[in-house]
Image (cartoon, rainbow, N blue to C red):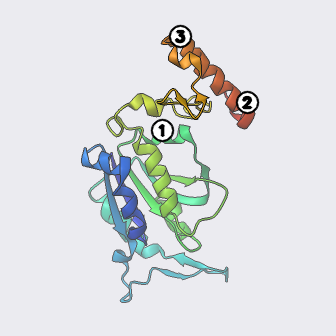
Amino acid sequence: MRIDILTLFPEQVHPFISTSIIKKAIDKNVVEIIIHNIRDYSKDKHKKVDDYAFGGAAGMVIKVEPLHLCIEELLKSYSYDEIIYMTPDGDSYNQKYANSLSLKNNLMIICGHYKGIDQRIRDNYVTKEISIGDYVLTGGELAASVVIDSIVRLIPGAISDITSALTDSFQDNLLAPPVYTRPEVYNGWTVPDILLSGNTAQIDAWHLEQSLEKTKLRRPDLLDSI
């Protein structure tokens, strides 16, 4: 998979792709992540990329020209399965969405800033608009990082055991069951006997029971989809 990130602040994204699972996935050629500075496409001598909104609305807007030039330059060499804009008024993001995007080959992600981007970019290029929650961030870089992390970890080869990702919370509309590791007893706290039994069928049944109980308690809305 190739992911192109369009941003005004590359320095916010570089640390994210330089650590942990994402860096390992890049090193193993599971994913290629390229960061593009929108300012590089500004024709203004001061590299100005924002301006006042027409109609007198408060806040600054990222101008259409630098984004248009950046996108068109990339489209000369690549075709994209989706051109995504991170925005608080986009579609709510969830695990099902992540699963779908993880199957794509090429993605472009546009990070907004200030009051957002000129609507003409959204109308003419963007194929999906995504929100990671009902709140507003200073820019789309953190939101884009969340989406990329959730996608990349699902690509075979990104993590050592893909079944680990496929049994995470929300994969089957259930929250994940409790997990334990060594030692079996610590500070008087013990691991449930069933997990030490070696009986795979009973352990699987226990996991399902625990997932159902946790989901019913914390996220009963998820059970409506089962």
Q: Which numbered tag is attached to residue 216?
A: 2
Q: Say which residue label 3 marks.
A: 201
Task: Examine the image and state in which quarter residue 34 appears.
Answer: bottom left
**Residue 99, percent from left and from top:** 48, 37
Secondary structure at numbered mark 1: helix
Q: Image check: 153 left or right of 212?
A: left
The answer to whether residue 36 is above or below residue 210 is: below
**Residue 5, percent from left and from top:** 39, 60
Q: Residues within 10 Å of mark 3 (few under 14, many from 20)?
A: few
Secondary structure at numbered mark 3: helix
* Amino acid at pointer 1: Ser
Q: Say which residue label 1 marks.
A: 100
The label nearer to you, 1 versus 2, is 2
Q: Image check: 74 left or right of 168?
A: left
Marks 2 and 1: in contact by CB < 8 Å?
no
Residue at (43% x, 84% y) in the render: 48
The label nearer to you, 3 versus 1, is 3
Q: Which numbered tag is attached to residue 30?
A: none
First-in-chain label (3 vs 2): 3
Residue at the farthest bottom position: 45
**Residue 79, percent from left and from top:** 33, 51
Residue at (64% x, 24% y) in the render: 210
Residue at (36% x, 83% y) in the render: 43
Q: CA–CA distance between discs 3 and 1?
A: 30 Å
Quarter of the image that includes the C terminus: top right
The label nearer to you, 3 versus 2, is 3
Residue 204 seen: no
First-in-chain label (3 vs 1): 1
**Residue 103, percent from left and from top:** 40, 37
Residue nearest the observer in this picture, 108 or 19: 19
* Amino acid at pointer 3: Ala
